[in-house]
Image (cartoon, grey):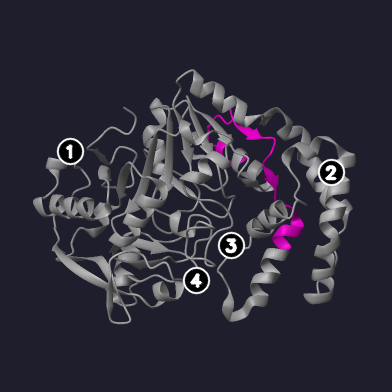
Amino acid sequence: MPGIVIIGVQWGDEGKGKATDLLGERTEWVVKFNGGNNAGHTVVIGDEKYALHLLPSGILSPGVTPVIGNGVVVDLEVLFQEIEALESRGIDTSKLKISANAHIITQAHRTLDKVQERFLGKRQIGTTGRGIGPAYADKISRVGIRIQDLFDESILRQKVEGALEQKNHLLVKIFNRRAITADEIVDDLLSYAERVRPMVVDASLLLDEALERDEVVVFEAGQATMLDIDHGTYPFVTSSSATAGGASTGSGVGPNRLDRIVGIVKAYTTRVGAGPFPTELFDEQGEWLRQAGFEFGTTTGRSRRVGWYDAPITRYATRINGITDLVVTKLDVLTGLEEIPVCVAYDVNGTRVDEVPVNQSDFHHAKPIYETYPGWSEDITGARTFEDLPQTAQDYILKLEDMSGTRISVIGVGPGRDQVIVRHDLVD
């Protein structure tokens, strides 16, 4: 089972970093294949907590070679800030590899992201303002700047000048901002060229050779299924392919190399930013869930919207991604609840709908239909086998498994690295 994809099932923040870290000791490679520094993974090792934004979480495992794939957009300033922060804590980052085809986020992208979001007013999408969307827009418009362009100053300058021409018209004439000069961007990018040069590789070839040697390669998604540019709650989505298909396009590895698709899902649901969220809670119980689960963004610090588990969304993600295994995280957060509601279907204009509506307007107006299950009061953070859980917690997991369309293989019962219950091995 050499090719394993780690995918978020909901709207992100499900705990993908922990799942990747769980595989770390038996993994030779971890590849980030989409997104940028607009999302984060929090990994807890012993008493140490690490918040990663751009780097693959596998960088924390000594035997792993971390790879930033071609599907990622790279902010070089953030990249080296993260590297320096980890090295100051004794983490070796020397194995990091970056695809020569990955695109670069520039000052112009960050500026445009912020002013465009403000310009939208009430129609704001809820971006992080880190330049992700504009960088991907340049990629699709074929005016993007790639990592490999850093090593030819003449080509770099030509590409920067071409990309800036339209952007400066927007900044000056529409948004009343100053123009950005090519020199500003070129000088900034060139200041990183020699530092990044040793990391740059043909990632597709490197990963193909690793898979030929039957080494375990984990493909780690940023964001999640419901934020995917094609299959998420558009337009309230990210700008990249956060589903299993993106693992191939974002790494240069063929889809027949992906042997197992692991979906990460919280025992409840959260999302950040605007957009539909059928099970969202606005009451005291919602605030309790937010505080109990410490639902604040790793990257932005923003409060996350919270709600109950949504089974139709998990079934949808299972179908879209071809999920073979689910990892349920944060089961311990639900401890103390007498009853736990689960959304099993939706009411759309008086009609019961059992799957995620294809029409975005219907999904926006969908009201959850709940079934309620008994909770538990026992501390489960020390549980290491399924049988260690209280019977009602076991029943809750089995109900979720029955409704979700695939097996639940791992259960997270706390933030620590070892606070997991493994029902089915993710590698063998």
Residue in front for this viewpoint, 386 or 233: 233
Q: Which three-letter amino acid code belongs to the residue tagged 2?
A: Leu
Give the spatial CA distance, label 3 vs label 4.
Answer: 12 Å
**Badge 4: residue crowd in 10 Å (few <14, some 14–19, many ≥20):** some
Specify few, some or many for label 1: CA neighbours under 10 Å numbering under 14, 14-19, or 20 or more. Answer: few
Please tell me which residue is depicted at 80% across the width and 63% down the height of the picture. Answer: 167
Q: Quadrant of the C terminus?
A: top left
Q: Is residue 413 visible?
A: yes
| Residue assigned mark 3 | 128
Give percent across and percent down for residue 414: 29, 47
Question: Which residue position is annotated with label 1?
Answer: 385
Q: Which residue matches tag 4? A: 274
SS at circle 2? helix
- Taking 73 as reference, is 5 left or right? left
Under mark 1, the amino acid is: Thr
Q: Which residues are magenta?
A: 84-111
List the residue tagged with mark 2: 156
Q: Tell me which numbered mark, 1 or 3, is placed earlier along the sequence.
A: 3
Does the stretch in magenta take in 375? no
Q: Secondary structure at mark 3?
A: loop
Locate the N terminus and report the quarter of the image it occupies: top left
**Mark 2, other Cα within 10 Å: few <14 / some 14–19 / many ≥20:** many
The nearer-to-camera label among 4 and 1 is: 4
